[in-house]
């Protein structure tokens, strides 16, 4: 009996639910009959969505194609006779650093040119002084200071030997040496003005030689620093497969590299945005 009672209760509940469904269906039909006709609105909206998606897809495809073409051009611009790139290489030197290197290299080149000119002038001055000294000594017809000093040294040595021995032989050896010194002294005394000029010229010659030595060392130092900058540029170039890169060439190349990186980032961004 309990089972039969439960069965009857279930049937009554199902009937009630069916009645509610039928009532809701009739109400929905009534509302639909009163609503205005859609005149293909749903179909129109569906068609608009398809057209919009097609236009968006075409625009996306064109953007990707344009970015890919720009990247190809950027890579071609990066390539040289030494290396051709199929992707943007890694470069450790920033364009600003490369430009600073190029600017410093250009400044040092100007300094090297000026130092070379200065060295040439100093060498010419030293050469002129040498010629002037030689001409003055030849025209005076007197013994040079070095010859006079040699004669005095010989005389003093022979005099010392004569004092120690006091022989005829030592006297005969000393006498011509003494006369030679007297002759040189007399001759030089008669050309005192020219000798004064000669001493001035020789001092000027010494100073010119000093300037030549200093200028030559300065030029060597500048060239060494220039070589260091050139090696830095060449090393940075070799790191990306480029040979014999000068600082100015490296500066231009790093600017192209930065442009290529920007194009690559743009392409990557478009690929992420339009990834299905």
Image (cartoon, helix red, strand yellow):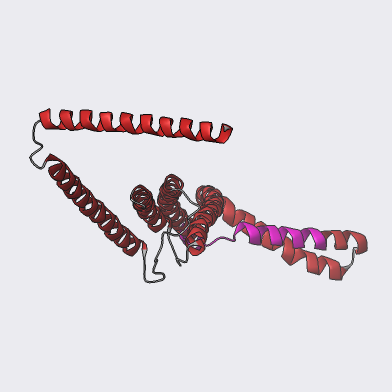
Name the residue furthest right: 165
Judged by its main secondary structure, the magenta piece is helix
Total residue callouts: 0
Whether residue 156 is visible, yes or no, is yes
- Which residue is at the front of the view, 242 or 19? 19
Q: Is residue 35 visible?
A: no
Residue 133 in magenta? Answer: yes
Residue 20 image offset from top left, x and y in percent: 32, 29
- Between 77 and 188, the one lying in front of the other is 77
Please indicate whether residue 36 sits to the left or right of residue 196 in the image.
left
Give residue 118's position: percent from left, percent from top: 44, 51
* 64 over 176 or under it: above or below: above
Q: Quadrant of residue 73?
A: bottom left
Residue shown at 50%/58% (left/top)? 236
Q: Is 57 on the left or on the right of 125, as rendered?
A: left
264 left or right of 214 in image = left
Write the start and end of the magenta stretch as one range: 131-158
**Viewer-closest of 182 and 133:** 133
Whether residue 186 is in magenta: the answer is no
- Residue 100 higher or lower than 77, as above or below: above
Q: Position of residue 151 (x, y in %)?
A: 70, 61
């Amino acid at each position: 009996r309990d089972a039969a009672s439960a069965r009857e209760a279930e049937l009554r509940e199902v009937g009630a639910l069916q009645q509610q469904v039928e009532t809701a269906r009739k109400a929905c039909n009534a509302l639909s009959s009163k609503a205005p006709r859609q005149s293909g609105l749903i179909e129109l909206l569906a068609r608009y969505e398809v057209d919009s998606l097609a236009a968006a897809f075409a625009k996306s495809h064109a953007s990707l194609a344009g970015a890919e073409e720009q990247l190809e051009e950027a890579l071609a611009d990066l390539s040289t006779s030494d290396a051709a790139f199929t992707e943007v290489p890694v470069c450790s030197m920033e364009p600003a650093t490369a430009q600073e290197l190029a600017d410093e290299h250009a400044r040092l080149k100007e300094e090297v040119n000026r130092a070379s000119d200065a060295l040439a002038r100093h060498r010419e001055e030293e050469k002129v002084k040498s010629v002037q000294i030689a001409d003055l000594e030849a025209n005076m017809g007197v013994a040079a200071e070095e010859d006079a000093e040699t004669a005095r040294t010989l005389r003093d040595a022979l005099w010392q030997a004569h004092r120690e021995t006091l022989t005829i032989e030592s006297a005969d050896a000393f006498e011509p040496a003494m006369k030679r010194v007297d002759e040189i002294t007399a001759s030089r005394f008669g050309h005192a003005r020219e000798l004064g000029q000669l001493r001035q010229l020789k001092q000027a010659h010494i100073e010119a030689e000093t300037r030549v030595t200093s200028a030559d060392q300065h030029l060597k130092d500048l060239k060494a620093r220039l070589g260091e900058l050139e090696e830095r540029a060449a090393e940075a170039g070799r790191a990306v497969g480029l040979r014999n890169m000068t600082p100015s060439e490296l500066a231009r190349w790093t600017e192209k590299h930065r442009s290529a990186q920007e194009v690559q980032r743009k392409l990557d961004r478009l690929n992420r945005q339009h990834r299905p």
